[in-house]
Image: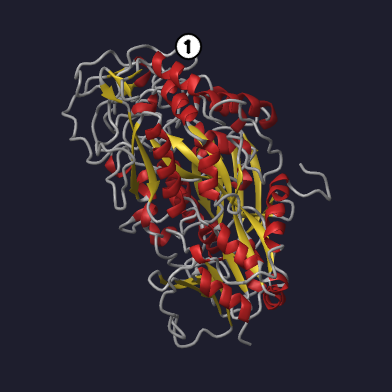
Amino acid sequence: MPRAGLAPRWLLLVMPLLTALALLAGCSTALPPQAQPVAPPPPPANPAGPDLGKQLTVAVDDLGTGFNPHLISDLSPVSTEVASLVLPSVFRPGPGGDPQLDTTVATSAKVTATAPFTVSYELNLGASWSDNAPIAAEDFVYLWQRMRADPGVVDAAGYRLITDVRSRAGGKAVDVVFAQNYPAWQRLFNNLLPAHLLKDAPRGFGTALSDSIPVSGGPFQVTALDRARGQLVLARNDHYWVNPPVLDTLVIRRIDPTGLLDGLRTGELPVAHLWPDQPTLSAVAQLGSRVRIQPVAQPMVVQLGMRTDQGVLTDVRLRQAVGALLNRDALIAVGTSTGVGGVRDDAQLLAPSEPGYHPTAPAGAPMHPDPALVTQQLTAAGYQRDAQGRWTLLGAPLRVTVGAPTDRPRFLAIAQEAAKELTAAGVAAQVVTAPGTALFTDPTVVPTPPSLSASPSPSPSASASASANPAGPPAAPGPPVPTRAGHGSSGGPVHPAAPPTPSPTPKPSTPPPGAAAPGAAAPVGPAAASSTASSTPGSGAAAASTTAPPPAPAGVVVDLAVMPRAVGADLASTAASNYGCPPGMAGVAQPARNSTGFCLAALQPVLDATLGGALAPEQAAATIESTLWQQLPAIPLFQTVTTLVTTPKGDQLTGHVGPGPLTIGPFGTAPSWQPANQ
């Protein structure tokens, strides 16, 4: 923990940049010519309705892609802030960041038994959704079921330990039973979702909250979203059972840099929360004393996730080679706009703004390009360089597909830079984009425009030798997976509900002990199909299926994805959620894989012991970190840092709003904000 009176490490890194930008005040306040956008038509005077009442407008530069705070694909500053105002949570972060019981939702929450480990919740009798349905046990059940079964969720490890959720007192008391001790239980059941509406929703958990949250269990409710005009309206929840907010409406409005500067200069925009590029932040800093600028660390790290359960990067040697080919400094500069939008992250578990963070990255690759390591790893995997400098296996080029989620321009820019670097180093690389709900969950994706190629070849990521030699050399065996409920004793997870997806890349030699890649895992998500086949990846071969396998899903395998990773949970849950083997669970035929498909037998006992409290996180962290840097399922780049801008009037209306807790953000105090039009 940082000592009292000392700024966190990440803040010390960001503040000099903001200070430097502020020194530009006195120069022209116009946006630099290269950053001048074409201003869109102004919105109508009152686009949200005939009467917004007591209103305050906050300017943003992006509304995000969705509002489900439990999905990796929906992680954004706006989704975090909206969830904090609309969705009920049993615990919320206190001033020091530790969870504190929110008595407006639950009057009591405590461990009531240890054999089995049981937590009992007494819910506030007045707590209800804005359609008058009670906030009750069914909401706990729904979130538990979705978090343990659906792919692409945030911090699922704790929910997967739950064996039962029991209702008492007409749903206003809940007993949650765990398979083992779980010290971090207070971090569960935050941002509860309305089960009575979502459990039968046609689009379900994955996409039902793409454009709204249908009801509210907090002080505000979502009443309008106009993506074309770039406006989201939160209105006071008249059914809120405790003190109502002062505002009638809180308007979150997307605005271009020119409109932002004009609004701040004239005072029409009292508050702005942005992820600015360098020219925009420089121009805002030039407003001098007319604005107050604060960095806001976001509960998100941007990383390169490597697909370890299928595709070319199932081999750890190829993952190490790709890491040694990339210029990480250049990727960070592209993603952060040369430092104004993020802080470099050199650890696999904690983010720079979290207490206890310290760099754990090794001195060499993937911190810096290492041509000698590239040659060593690719040669060991059977690849050679041809006369044109291309890496080939049996005469066919090594291909890597780099993916980025749609509607995230900076992520696409990172993907394009990575593909350019790989191509320059002799790897055939292409860039594809797809919705995050598919990119972070499905075995393959159907690319959506704009999909750009960094190499002349339009071929999707696949085996470099499949066409040259259909039989190919034998595949390198993956490591065994630890035996646990629902898993085969040979080490591979048994998935009776879906056929195995073998790695498409033949490997001519077996990786050295301790460096083998995890074996292939069955498809998950919408593309998965039912079958009675089972797989034991540790053996390197699939068991025979008793039924004909379904046709392969259309699309391409994304080997390397630019993706967000949620931070802010406890270290043990973060490690087990992001890098653990999915456990077998009653009622879940096919456990959802983590975002990269990573599963390592040697690491799993450490993750399990840390999650259950048998091993202190501080004791386990060094082992986990070193293993992840060697196995390289992901390369962290930076923690996102946004910018909060307020005018003197904005400070007066918001009570000098600050960054707020990491997982809540600046809007946590919005119920007490005053209207600008009073």
Q: Nearer the viewer, residue 631 or 483?
A: 631
Left/right placement of residue 228 relative to residue 529 reads right
Kindly identify the residue that appears in the image at 69 percent across and 78 percent down.
649
SS at badge 1:
loop
Residue bearing the label numbered 1: 513
Q: Quadrant of residue 292?
A: bottom right
Q: Is residue 263 above or below residue 669?
A: below
Kindly identify the residue that appears in the image at 67 percent across and 75 percent down.
650
Query: Where in the figure is residue 506, as x and y percent of width and height?
Result: 29, 19
Kindly identify the residue that appears in the image at 23 percent across and 32 percent down.
531
Query: Where in the figure is residue 154, as x and y percent of width and height?
Result: 50, 45
Q: Looking at the figure, which quarter contains the C terminus?
A: bottom right
Q: Is residue 314 above or below residue 258?
A: above
Query: Where in the figure is residue 211, as x and y percent of width and height?
Result: 40, 64
Question: What is the count of numbered marks?
Answer: 1
Q: Can residue 592 be seen in this snapshot?
A: no
Query: Where in the figure is residue 502, as x and y percent of width and height?
Result: 29, 25
Amino acid type, residue under disc 1 in the picture: Pro
Q: Quadrant of residue 393?
A: top left
